[in-house]
Image (tube, rainbow, N blue to C red):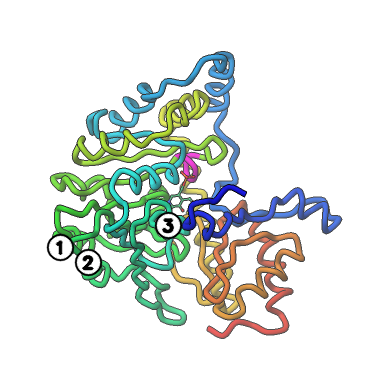
């Protein structure tokens, strides 16, 4: 056997959620509902499908490695220079690129925990030290766990190259507001890159939650990460982007890009999606309305769900999480459990959410959640 890198051999294998078709077959039912991966339930817009179909006829060629058209469209949309934009094969690729570009043995990566599951893997990959900083615990029936920005700032030291702030936070759905985030950015030394991961930005409705791109201006050590996977409905195509205040940051992140990893179809779809932003916004508004209905329905059942600023809700079920998720799965509803902590449920269509609520009623019927 060839000896692997010990850090990689020790890594847990990635476990994607259950495939709904497989689960439906296993349970002998027509359909399983998947509310586990924070996708939107809408299919891609017709204009986007047409752009993908048109690009499909050219796939005997390699894609444009610099994603020139998509980069230009993003730069125009967000009022930045193309030199500030990096396109990647999903925001996950850009997280990896950030880690490879800035970190290695002897350095550290600071992030809140619990947060996006990929963050702790970045240090494993490059040999950097991961510094998880516990979220401030929420109160039962009140706000959910959220970022402790003071503790996050205190965890940054001379070795810290990257600090990740997931806003709104996956999986709790909570978001930090402008004054505290500004104070945090003022505190972090300019030798540390602050990455504002705004994968769910388009679902934010609280006016107190700042747009990271606005906060970024004038701060060369800040970059914003976004994705076409969620609001824009392109999870299956893998395309995300980073916008950095300092073009030198974008340049460095581009250097660790796996050549040609953003496909021609993904680039074409991204351009077409940006051109259909009004329809995308309407869809986001529908998701937000359904998020509010789902939140109210859960609270009505005694589940202490906090306000979410994303397209998912967080059920702080603690020790019952794994058992509830398994019982829901047995009723053909796939959610995302974080055992011992809570259950993340993606906002689906009203019909899907009703299937989930009905299944939850059966599961919790015997032992309701205390508020
Ligand atoms: C906070 C956060 N960042 C980044 C991503 C990655 O998105 P993608 O790689 O699909 O662009 C996700 C996906 O779940 C996420 O939740």
Residue drawn at x 42%, y 20% is 64
Whether residue 256 sits left or right of residue 262 in the image: it is left
Mark 2 or mark 1, earlier in chain? 2
> Residue 361: horizontal and vertical position, in percent?
69, 73
The residue at 36%/67% (across/down) is: 132
Q: Is mark 3 within 8 Å of ligand 1?
A: no
Horizontal side, residue 133 vs residue 13: left or right: left
Between the C-alphas of marks 2 and 1, the distance is 7 Å
Q: Secondary structure at mark 1?
A: helix
Q: Which residues are magenta?
A: 228-232
Tell me if label 2 and label 1 are in contact, CB under 8 Å: yes
Q: Which residue is mark 1?
A: 187
Q: Secondary structure at mark 2?
A: helix
Residue 5 location (% of width, % of height):
48, 52
Q: Residue 153, labelled with which disc? A: 2
Label 2 neighbourhood size at 10 Å, few (<14), some (14-19), many (20+)? Answer: many
Viewer-side residue, 278 vs 275: 275
The residue singled out by tag 3 in the image is 124
**Label 1–label 3 contact, CB within 8 A:** no
At horizontal 28% and vertical 47% (from top left) the residue drawn is 102
Does the segment drawn in magenta span residue 181? no
**Among all residues in the image, which is located at the extreme right?**
28
First in sequence: mark 1 or mark 3?
Answer: 3
5 up-or-down from 115: above or below: above
Residues packed near mark 1 inside 10 Å, few (<14), some (14 to 19) or many (20 plus): few
């Amino acid at each position: 056997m060839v000896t692997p890198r010990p850090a990689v051999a020790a890594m847990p294998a990635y476990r994607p959620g259950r495939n709904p078709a497989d689960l439906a077959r296993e349970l002998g039912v027509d359909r399983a509902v998947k509310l586990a991966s924070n996708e939107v339930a809408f299919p891609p817009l017709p204009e986007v499908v047409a752009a993908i179909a048109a690009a499909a006829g050219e796939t005997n060629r390699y894609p444009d490695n610099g994603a020139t058209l998509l980069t230009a469209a993003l730069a125009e949309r967000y009022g930045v220079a193309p030199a500030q934009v990096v396109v990647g094969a999903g925001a996950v690729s850009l997280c990896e690129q950030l880690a490879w570009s800035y970190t290695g043995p002897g350095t550290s990566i600071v992030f809140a925990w619990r947060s996006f599951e990929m963050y702790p893997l970045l240090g494993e990959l490059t040999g950097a030290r991961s510094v998880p900083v516990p979220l401030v615990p929420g109160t039962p029936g009140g706000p959910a766990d959220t970022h402790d920005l003071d503790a996050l700032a205190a965890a940054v030291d001379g070795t810290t190259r990257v600090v990740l702030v997931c806003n709104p936070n996956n999986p709790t759905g909570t978001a930090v507001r402008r004054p505290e985030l500004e104070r945090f950015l003022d505190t972090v030394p300019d030798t540390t890159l602050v990455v504002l991961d705004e994968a769910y930005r388009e679902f934010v409705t609280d006016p107190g939650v700042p747009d990271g791109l606005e906060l970024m201006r004038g701060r060369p050590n800040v970059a914003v990460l976004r994705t076409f996977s969620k609001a824009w409905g392109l999870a299956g195509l893998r395309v995300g982007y980073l916008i950095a205040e300092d073009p030198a940051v974008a340049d460095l992140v581009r250097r660790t890009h796996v050549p040609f990893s953003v496909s021609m179809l993904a680039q074409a779809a991204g351009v077409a999606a940006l051109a259909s932003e009004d329809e995308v916004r309407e869809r986001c508004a529908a998701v937000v309305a359904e998020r509010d209905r789902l939140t109210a329905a859960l609270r009505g059942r005694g589940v202490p769900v906090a306000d979410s600023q994303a397209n998912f809700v967080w059920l702080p079920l603690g020790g019952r999480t794994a058992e509830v998720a398994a019982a829901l799965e047995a009723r053909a509803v796939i959610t995302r459990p974080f055992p011992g902590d809570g259950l993340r449920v993606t906002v689906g269509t009203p019909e899907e959410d009703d299937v989930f609520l009905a299944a939850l009623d059966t599961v919790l019927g015997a032992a309701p959640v205390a508020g």
